[in-house]
């Protein structure tokens, strides 16, 4: 009987340890982005700007609402890298495999898609106020998966920052995109840049902060 109690106690202890480890692991990956998914990349157009100017000045900004929906939160964004003078912007997006059920329901798909590369298309929308918008397709896109998540590193060239009030990444299921982005076909969007924030009926400037460009990404 004593041996049975010891075995039972040991089993319960191991179960508790396993449960705690699982909880810690989920907390760890909840906001974890592998370094290679957020690291700055050098596109051909950006490299040309660097060689022409001899330098690049990069900035970043904390994303105030880094998800596409207050209730579902299917897509998340992190690590904005903005180079206004070079007309360039980079961002990293992530979605959970479980979010594909919501995607299937939104588009009325016959089956829930599997998590793989190329499922989604992304477009940058720049607002200058008064219902005026500029749109940009990504010039660079690289996907990778880790655990339950799919990560996408995006870069946009030729982005005009002039008079930009806010910028957002629009998300489309690739099978519904067909080169025609419409509000009805858009699954969601994440505001990744805001020139100002509203507080008690006031507009407070939200300036960009300096971003240190890793030397290893600069072209020779």
Image (cartoon, rainbow, N blue to C red):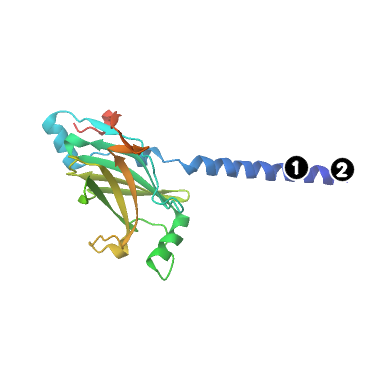
Is residue 144 placed above or below 197 in the rendered structure?
Answer: below
**Residue toward you, 202 or 33:** 202
User: In what element is the residue under mark 1?
Assistant: helix
User: Which residue is the site of mark 1?
Assistant: 10
Q: Quadrant of residue 211?
A: top left
Q: Position of residue 68 (x, y in %)?
A: 38, 50
Q: Residue furthest left?
A: 52
Which numbered dot is residue 80?
Answer: none
Number of numbered discs on residues: 2
Q: Position of residue 171 (x, y in %)?
A: 32, 55
User: In what element is the residue under mark 2?
Assistant: helix
Q: Quadrant of residue 26?
A: top right
Q: Position of residue 216 (x, y in %)?
A: 27, 31
- Let me know if residue 40 appears in the view: no
**Residue toward you, 177 or 55:** 177
- Quick check: marks 1 and 2 in contact, CB under 8 Å? no
Q: Position of residue 107 (x, y in %)?
A: 37, 66
Circle 2 Cα neighbour tier, 10 Å, few/some/many (<14 / 14–19 / ≥20): few
Q: Residue furthest right?
A: 1
At 20% from the left edge and 30% from the top edge, which residue is drawn? 56
Circle 1 Cα neighbour tier, 10 Å, few/some/many (<14 / 14–19 / ≥20): few
- Let me know if residue 210 appears in the view: yes
User: Which residue is the site of mark 2?
Assistant: 2
**Residue toward you, 210 or 46:** 210
At 34% from the left edge and 39% from the top edge, which residue is drawn? 201
Q: Residue furthest bottom?
A: 110
- 218 left or right, relative to 54: right
Is residue 30 placed above or below 102 in the rendered structure?
Answer: above
Q: Where the C terminus falls, by quadrant?
A: top left
Which callout, 1 or 2, points at the residue further toward the start of the chain? 2
């Amino acid at each position: 009987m004593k041996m049975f109690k010891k075995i039972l106690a040991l089993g319960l202890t191991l179960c508790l340890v396993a449960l705690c480890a699982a909880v810690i692991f989920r907390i760890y990956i909840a906001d974890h982005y592998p370094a290679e998914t957020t690291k700055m990349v050098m596109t051909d157009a950006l490299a040309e700007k660097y060689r022409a100017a001899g330098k690049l000045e990069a900035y970043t900004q904390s994303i105030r609402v880094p998800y596409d929906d207050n209730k579902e939160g299917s897509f998340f964004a992190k690590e904005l890298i903005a180079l206004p003078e070079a007309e360039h912007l980079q961002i990293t997006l992530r979605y959970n495999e479980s979010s594909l059920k919501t995607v299937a329901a939104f588009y009325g798909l016959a089956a829930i898609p599997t998590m793989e590369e190329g499922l989604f298309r992304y477009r940058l929308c720049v607002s200058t106020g008064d219902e005026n918008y500029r749109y940009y397709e990504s010039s660079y896109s690289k996907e990778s998966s880790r655990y339950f998540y799919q990560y996408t590193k995006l870069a946009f060239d030729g982005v005009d920052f002039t008079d930009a009030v806010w910028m957002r990444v629009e998300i489309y299921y690739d099978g519904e995109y067909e080169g025609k982005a419409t509000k009805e076909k858009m699954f969601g969007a994440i505001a990744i840049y805001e020139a100002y924030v509203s507080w008690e009926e006031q507009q407070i400037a939200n300036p960009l902060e300096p971003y240190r460009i890793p030397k290893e990404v600069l072209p020779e």
